Every structure is written in structure tokens, then in C-alpha cells.
């Protein structure tokens, strides 16, 4: 079993680290601390840290250009000025109390998909999966407590979606040209385990981080578990391939909600980890401007 290592212990520990993304243009990692309301970025070695605070919890971030980020805030997707943090809303959601935006990922054409999560103590299935387009966020599928990680096959013909509370990773036929996902079926059923963030590699294998499971599990395109990467933190939240050859898997974790005994047993919780892989990752693009609403289209 492979073992992930801390990237750089001088990087900030995250209450709820999420949204790991590798930007191939700038050769930098981006990730967020959702409830710490922070966006972080560093180079492939975990150095040259840049951080910015956000007004609301932030669940994902992507660079749009050198000066601008696209961020998923609690109830809106907005452009942020990287230097000042100034927000320009693109799409807002009128969410029920206790709900917020969660994991976001772009399809191979740069079309953003995002889920919501019901964070109440006894969550109902009132969260949903959304797709961002020129006219804002469209609800595609409801009935979730936690609509979470997403990934695509290398040819873009298959979309994967983590249904955390049910322990299921769903699989859909996907049309990259139209952004339509259909023929939903079970890819893997993990039972009591909680799949969170997803990514895929060049062979079409799917990497699923397991929240509460101290690991990343790897599945073949047919859904067979073929590998597992141990992470020295129980609450593993997201992963992404990066580095110049896309053979480094970067992993975020969280320490929020852990009591003193749990933190003593896993003191590295909240840090960023990495491990080297033989098969390179499948590139994950940033949002494409052709699929983004203009500011006057906010609703």
C-alpha cells in the first residue's frame, strides 16, 4: 500500500481543506479551507505560499487569469480579485438554511459542475447537483444530503459523482458537447464508507478519497478496487494530480470536528499530502469563459 507524505508542514493547516486543483498554466496548486474561509496556492513543492481570505465559506477555487479567481462561496459563484479579494457575483443560489455550495469540478470542456450540502445535524435529502452555464446555475438532480466530488473519464464520455451520505459513486453517460449527463447507475457502492473528492488518471482509473477512512481508494473503469493509498489523517477530502508530468497526487485533509484524542492520534490532520504515481493523471481544466455567465446575468 502506498503511503502519502506531508507536502510541507509550514503550509497552513486547514479546518476543512478541500478543492485541490493543479493549474498547468502557472504550475501552481490551489485549494481552500472551507470554514477557515481561506484560499491557498503554492508551487508543486509546497513553497511560495499565497493566501487570501473570503467573506463567506469557500468550497472550491480556480484561476481564470493572473489576477482573477473563480470561487464557490456558500451561496454564490463569484469572481475574486486575487490581490484584494473583491467579489463580482456570477450566479447566486437561494438555498435553504443549513445548506451551502460544496465540491466543484469542470468537465473536459471547462463546464463547471457543483453540488450543495445539507450541513444540519439531521440532514434531509434537500441538496442537489448543479451545472453552471451562461444563464447561471441550473439544478440538474436533487435528492442528496451531500452532492460531492466529480470526475470524468479521459475521453469525457463518462462522468462520476460521489454521493457521500449513501456511500455510492454514481456513473453517467456524458456528452461533452452539450454537458448532458444521463443513464445514471452505480459505479461502486462503498457501504458505510464516505467517498468525498474524486479524480481520474490517464488509464481511466478513478481515485476516491474516503472521509473518515484515512485513505484514497483507486478503482478501475469497471469499478474494481485496484489500489489504496494510506493517508495519516482520517478526514481525507479531495485529491488532484499535478506536477509537470501529472504523476504527483496531491491530497487535502481536515481537522474540524476532531476531539483532542483524535487529534493526538492524527496530529497531521488538516495538512496537504502527496504521493507519486506511475500512471499520470488525467488533466482537469479550469472553467472556460465560454461557459460562464456575465455579471449582469446573476439571479
Image (cartoon, helix red, strand yellow):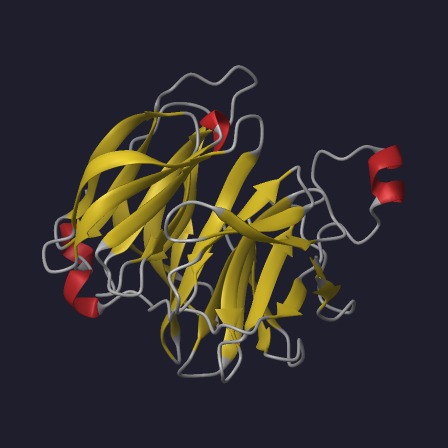
* Horizontal side, residue 134 vs residue 73: left or right: left
**Relative image position of residue 195 (x, y in whole percent):** 51, 39
Taking the spot 12% from the left edge, 49% from the top edge, the residue there is 135
Q: Quadrant of the N terminus?
A: bottom right
In front here: 220 or 46? 220
**Relative image position of residue 283 (x, y in whole percent):** 38, 71
**Relative image position of residue 194 (x, y in whole percent):** 55, 34
- Which image quadrant for residue 189? top left
* Horizontal side, residue 178 vs residue 254: left or right: left
* Horizontal side, residue 150 vs residue 1: left or right: left
In front here: 50 or 103? 103
Relative to 31, does residue 117 appear above or below in the rendering? above
Taking the spot 14% from the left edge, 51% from the top edge, the residue there is 297
Taking the spot 71% from the left edge, 52% from the top edge, the residue there is 270
Residue 176 seen: yes
**Residue positioned most to the left:** 178
Taking the spot 29% from the left edge, 50% from the top edge, the residue there is 159
- Which image quadrant for residue 44? bottom right
* Horizontal side, residue 62 vs residue 52: left or right: left
Amino acid at each position: 500500500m502506498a503511503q502519502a507524505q506531508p507536502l510541507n508542514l509550514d503550509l497552513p493547516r486547514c479546518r476543512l481543506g478541500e478543492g485541490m486543483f493543479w493549474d498547468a498554466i502557472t504550475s501552481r496548486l490551489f485549494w481552500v479551507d472551507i470554514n477557515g474561509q481561506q484560499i491557498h496556492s503554492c508551487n508543486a513543492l509546497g513553497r511560495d505560499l499565497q493566501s487570501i481570505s473570503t467573506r463567506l465559506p469557500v468550497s472550491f477555487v480556480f484561476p481564470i487569469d493572473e489576477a482573477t479567481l473563480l470561487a464557490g462561496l456558500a451561496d454564490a459563484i463569484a469572481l475574486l480579485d486575487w490581490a484584494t479579494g473583491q467579489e463580482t457575483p456570477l450566479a447566486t443560489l437561494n438555498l435553504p438554511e443549513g445548506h451551502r455550495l460544496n465540491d466543484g469540478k469542470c468537465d473536459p470542456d471547462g463546464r463547471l459542475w457543483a453540488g450543495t450540502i445539507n450541513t444540519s445535524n439531521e440532514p434531509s435529502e434537500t441538496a442537489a447537483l448543479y451545472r453552471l452555464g451562461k444563464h447561471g446555475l441550473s439544478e440538474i438532480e436533487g435528492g442528496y444530503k451531500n452532492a460531492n466530488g466529480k470526475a470524468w473519464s479521459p475521453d469525457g464520455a463518462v462522468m462520476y459523482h460521489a454521493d457521500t451520505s449513501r456511500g455510492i459513486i454514481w456513473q453517467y453517460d456524458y456528452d461533452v458537447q452539450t454537458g448532458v449527463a444521463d443513464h445514471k447507475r452505480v459505479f461502486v457502492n462503498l457501504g458505510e464508507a464516505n467517498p468525498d473528492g474524486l479524480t481520474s488518471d490517464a488509464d481511466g482509473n478513478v481515485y476516491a478519497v474516503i472521509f473518515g477512512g484515512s485513505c484514497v481508494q483507486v478503482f478501475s473503469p469497471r469499478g474494481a478496487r485496484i489500489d489504496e493509498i494510506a493517508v495519516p489523517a482520517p478526514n481525507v477530502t479531495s485529491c488532484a494530480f499535478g506536477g509537470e508530468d501529472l504523476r504527483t497526487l496531491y491530497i487535502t485533509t481536515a481537522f474540524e470536528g476532531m476531539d483532542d484524542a483524535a487529534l493526538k492520534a492524527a496530529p497531521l490532520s488538516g495538512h496537504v499530502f502527496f504521493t507519486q504515481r506511475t500512471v499520470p493523471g488525467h488533466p482537469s481544466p479550469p472553467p472556460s469563459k465560454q461557459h460562464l455567465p456575465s455579471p449582469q446575468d446573476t439571479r
